[in-house]
Image: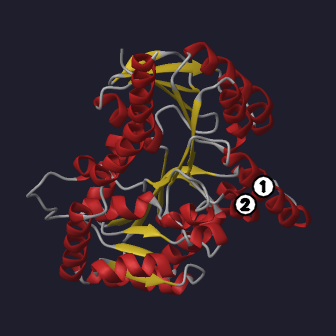
Amino acid sequence: MPIKICVLTSAHPAFDVRIFHKECKSLARAGYDVTLVAPHRESQSIDGVTLRAVAPATGRFERWFKTTWAVYRAAVAVDADVYHFHDPELLPVGLLLRARGKKAIYDIHEDWPLTVSYKPYVPKWLQRPLAKICSIVESLTVRHFSGLIAATPEIAARFSGHSNVCVVQNYPIREEFFSEGTENSARSDYVTYVGLRITKARGAEEMVRAMGLLAESHSIRLKLAGAIEPTALLQQLEATPGWTSIDYLGSLGRAGVSELIRNAIAGLVVLHPEPNYVSSHPVKLFEYMCAGIPVIASDFPVFRSIIDGAKCGILVDPLSDRQIADAIKFLYTHPEDARVMGARGRLAVSSRYNWQHEEQTLLEMYNRMCHAAESCEQLGSQLT
């Protein structure tokens, strides 16, 4: 019988790229029996993965206090050999599953305590003590889990004392964005930003204002894909000079994202210098590179090492509308330079920054956990 894996999320959509399209599909292809418990309208089987749906929450508090326990009940019903959960709010669920004698893996997407500083619903006076509480809770609970998967080396360093930590970075699936031996020869007159959410901390205001600086002299447009949050921010942006040069597309499927990126002049990653972002490895950066377009990114040390190393884009002060506008203008008016940068980025992804490489790390961790335990059980039965 194949080993049963149950993947859990309460905060992410069922078809989240890292969770479903990368990790779940990779595990299913490797021969594991994979069930994903996630908020969705209906249960189904797709691409070798069984999706067990729980009712989506209507708000943040309902998700914390109702969806998490719906996820736990569904997880217990699956009766898997290994549980792999993705959200800090599921830490209590992971502990309960461990108490039932199950293996549990905590997949850490972000440096959770550092995210508190830019949560709009957390009052300023509460941010520092709450971040400290989050750090303590995470540190006390992770020691009980069978394994930890960190999305970046910086996150993994926080948990170096754990006996089983591996880094599985959120690099793109190459085939989503290009075919080997092909190169984009023509692009539309637009730059793009693609993300699950578009917020102030992700540079929404600066991007729109930068387009306002370009509007009089150039016909470039900015295509935004993702959900602008909160609603008040959308209203604010609509009243900002530059909005007339924006095409707001909302959330797109994977095929739509791929087409949008592949045909752009450049991709923007102008995150604010928030503690969690400064050390992040945003997947959109690597998706832009994978699609063969240059990137315009915040001048953070981690981004600099990637972009300068590959010579695939322009670094800017993310709080400077002018620097963002100048970078867009340069790539628009120097198409050959943009083409060469894009080709270098694609080469870097093809050789290093791709999911196929990270998939092996994921499968090696599962192989160590599951098959080593399986061998021990077989040896025990032979001895008795």
Q: Which amino acid does the dot numbered 2 rest on? A: Pro
Residues under labels 2 and 1: Cα distance? 5 Å
Res 119 seen here: yes
Relative placement, left or right, of 80 versus 333 is right
Q: Which residue is mark 1?
A: 134
Badge 2 is on which residue?
Answer: 113
Which is nearer the eye, 183 or 235?
Answer: 183
**Upstream in sequence: badge 2 or badge 1:** 2
Who is closer to the viewer here, 258 or 299?
A: 299
Picture quadrant where residue 189 is located: bottom left
At x 43%, y 32%, the residue is 370
Kind of residue sitting beneath label 1 = Cys
Q: Quadrant of residue 130?
A: bottom right
Q: Is residue 223 depicted above or below 69 in this figure?
A: below
Q: Residue 253 falls in which quadrant of the image?
A: top left
Judging from the image, the colouring scheme is secondary structure
